[in-house]
Image (tube, helix red, strand yellow):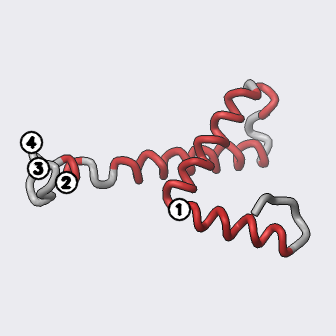
Amino acid sequence: MSDTNGDDTESTATRYKYTNDLILGALVLGFLGLLTAAALGVIDLTLIPWYAIAALIAYVGIGIVWAFGPEAVKGWNEAKLLVGGEGDA
């Protein structure tokens, strides 16, 4: 199986090109759906264990860094510092 030529179905680059993007999209949409449901009073977030919420926030954060790169996180941190927020630049 060749991983260098991405033109055939034997290549992992061809077969798995959008797998990570789809997983990240589902994770972010699920997180936003959870927050929306909580805001509308459909679910009570206090019923979800704190460690599950912490893991979900960490997964979404890692996914965003993976999708947009560390430069986006550095830019967000610098923008927080400019408006008086806390951050470690």
Identify the mark at residue 1; answer none if there is no mark.
4
What type is the residue that disc 4 sits on?
Met
Residue 33, horizontal then vertical, whole percent: 63, 47
* Upstream in sequence: badge 4 or badge 2: 4
Q: CA distance from mark 1 to mark 4?
A: 30 Å
Determine crowd level at label 2: few under 14, some 14-19, many 20+ residues with C-alpha closer than 10 A.
some
Instruction: Look at discs 3 and 1 and give the one toward the viewer.
Output: 1
* Upstream in sequence: badge 4 or badge 3: 4
Question: Is the Cβ of the residue at disc 1 closer than 8 Å to that at disc 4?
Answer: no
Q: CA distance from mark 2 to mark 3?
A: 6 Å
Question: Is the Cβ of the residue at disc 2 closer than 8 Å to that at disc 3?
Answer: yes
Give the vertical position of 13 relative to 41 (above or below).
Answer: below
Question: Is the Cβ of the residue at disc 1 closer than 8 Å to that at disc 2?
Answer: no
What type is the residue that disc 3 sits on?
Thr
Identify the residue position indicated by label 1 in the image: 69
Residue drawn at (67%, 42%) of the image: 57
* Upstream in sequence: badge 1 or badge 4: 4
What type is the residue that disc 2 sits on?
Thr
Q: CA distance from mark 4 to mark 2?
A: 12 Å
Q: CA distance from mark 1 to mark 2?
A: 22 Å
Identify the residue position indicated by label 2 in the image: 14
Instruction: Look at discs 4 and 3 and give the one toward the viewer.
Output: 4
In the structure shown, which secondary structural element does the residue marked by tag 4 occupy? loop
Q: CA distance from mark 3 to mark 1?
A: 28 Å
Identify the residue position indicated by label 3 in the image: 9
Residue drawn at (59%, 67%) of the image: 71
Specify the quadrant of the image occupied by residue 49.
top right
Instruction: Look at discs 1 and 2 and give the one toward the viewer.
Output: 1
